[in-house]
Image (cartoon, helix red, strand yellow):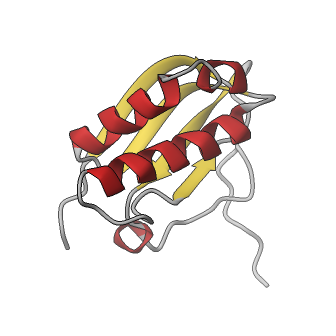
Amino acid sequence: MPNIRFMNWNIEKLSGNKVAIPGVVANLGRVIVNANADVVIILEVAQVSGAAAMAALSAAANAASIAAGGAATDFTGWFLSYHTGGERYGFLIKNMNMVRPVHVTAGPAGAPPAAA
């Protein structure tokens, strides 16, 4: 099994407003690609506009990857955690096949899903 490199980053309220600032999301994407992380954990993702912000971040990381000679689909895997008070955690995954299988719990309590 290959090593998986993690990056933990507190962007401080990643939101639709933040990624709308000219140049911000492109710079975030370049930093992620230059870090060469397989899984990027984003702290403080906004509850309301977090999904749109993560989609923009995914697109920016893919654009930066292409510019660096990578694939256009390097950072297409992303998801958000359950609400953790006033925010969420975002996860951006470079290669989904490297982290499979991912176990998804039934809820924030960590209970396994019910048997089908």
Q: Residue at x 48, y 48 (%)?
A: 92
Residue 95 occupies which quadrant of the picture? bottom left
Whole-percent x, y for residue 33 in the image: 30, 44
Residue 38 appears in the picture as rendered: no
Residue 16 shown left or right of residue 1 in the figure:
right
Vertical arrangement, residue 59 with respect to residue 29, above or below: below
Q: Residue at x 51, y 66 (%)?
A: 102
Residue 85 occupies which quadrant of the picture? top right
Q: Residue at x 34, y 66 (%)?
A: 71
Q: Give 19 or 106, whichever is nearer the viewer.
A: 19
Furthest residue in direction top, as rendered: 12
Vertical arrangement, residue 40 with respect to residue 42, above or below: below
Q: Give 102 or 46, whichever is nearer the viewer.
A: 46
Q: Residue at x 56, y 20 (%)?
A: 22
Residue 95 appears in the picture as rendered: yes
Residue 52 shown left or right of residue 23 in the figure:
right
Furthest residue in direction left, as rendered: 2
Vertical arrangement, residue 87 with respect to residue 1, above or below: above
Whole-percent x, y for residue 28 in the image: 42, 30
Exactly how many numbered labels are in the figure?
0
Vertical arrangement, residue 102 with respect to residue 111, above or below: below
Residue 48 shown left or right of residue 63 in the figure:
right
